[in-house]
Image (cartoon, helix red, strand yellow):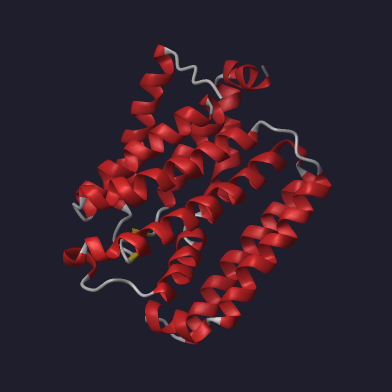
Amino acid sequence: MRVHLKTVDVVVIGISAALYAVFGILTAGFSFLGVGFLPAVVIPAIFAVLYGPWVGGAGAAIGIFIRDMFVHGNAALSLIAGVPANFIVFFLIGYIAIRNISLKQALSGITIAVIGLIIPVLVFLPDFITFTLLSAESFLLTFGLTIILSLTVIAAVSIRYKEWRSYAIGAVIGQIAGAALLSVTVWAVSPLFLDFFGVPLATIYILPLFIWTFATEIPFVLLLGPPIIKACYRAFPSLRQRNLK
């Protein structure tokens, strides 16, 4: 895939990165293993749809690095774990959002997501409770509501709003890929950052970190993205024409 970035794309990358960083810093008070609660993820998702995957991915990568410098200050860890994962998430969202995904493909993806997310949580529930420091009731309620709400939104969108079907699927695929990359990378490099983690992370940390990352980001991308993108299309019809091309 060739990269075609115009001058305006470079400018937009800077704007996206700045907005993502600022809002990411403002909402960084709640985190797990350095991965924060990030409502700001909707910002690069919007830019990825409006201006394409390279703009979305690059803006997210730069923005998360700036955010990390203010939140935990570990540049090497951010470059190894946060930057690549963020690029992957929003590149995929931008790439898939403009594809024509059928209802059958969408529902199949939802079924796979349900099985892949819920079964591991039930199997490893005691480990989740230990490492998140939440009660079993609190964890299941938070996780359950997040997953059920997210997948319900995807199903409803896929059936009722065909124009947002690909965006919803792209959001899920992107978040799953990014969360998986982040969780595995953080676990793998933790022995190199003992000043940050204290001790090398056990393998069992991978799944809780994956679930945490997915569950704290996907609702914002799914619920806030479509209405904001629709408003942008109304204000700037040329953006819609660009995507149609």
Quarter of the image where one finds residue 13: top left
User: In this rendering, would 53 be left or right of 111?
Assistant: left
Residue at the top extreme of this rendering: 7
Is residue 81 or residue 58 the one in the foreground? 81
Is 128 in front, or is 46?
A: 128
Residue farthest toward the left in the current orientation of the protein: 195
Q: Which residue is rendered at x = 56% and y = 34% of the image?
A: 94
Answer with left or right where residue 245 lies relative to residue 1: right
Q: Residue at x 50, y 45 (%)?
A: 89
Name the residue located 78 percent from the left edge and 47 percent from the top edge.
Answer: 105
Q: Quadrant for the N terminus, please.
A: top right
Expressed as whole percent of the image width and height from the top left, the position of residue 163 reads 73, 36
Q: Quadrant of the C terminus?
A: top right
Q: Residue furthest right?
A: 104
Q: Residue at x 31, y 60 (%)?
A: 189
Where is residue 104 shown, x and y percent of the image? 83, 49
Left of 108 or right of it: where is 92? left
Picture layout, residue 230 above or below residue 213 = above
> How far across and down, in percent of the image, does residue 187 sit?
36, 64
Q: On the rendered structure, is 158 left or right of 235?
A: right
Is 32 located above or below residue 185 in the figure?
A: below
Tally of numbered tags: 0
Residue 54: % across, % down = 48, 28
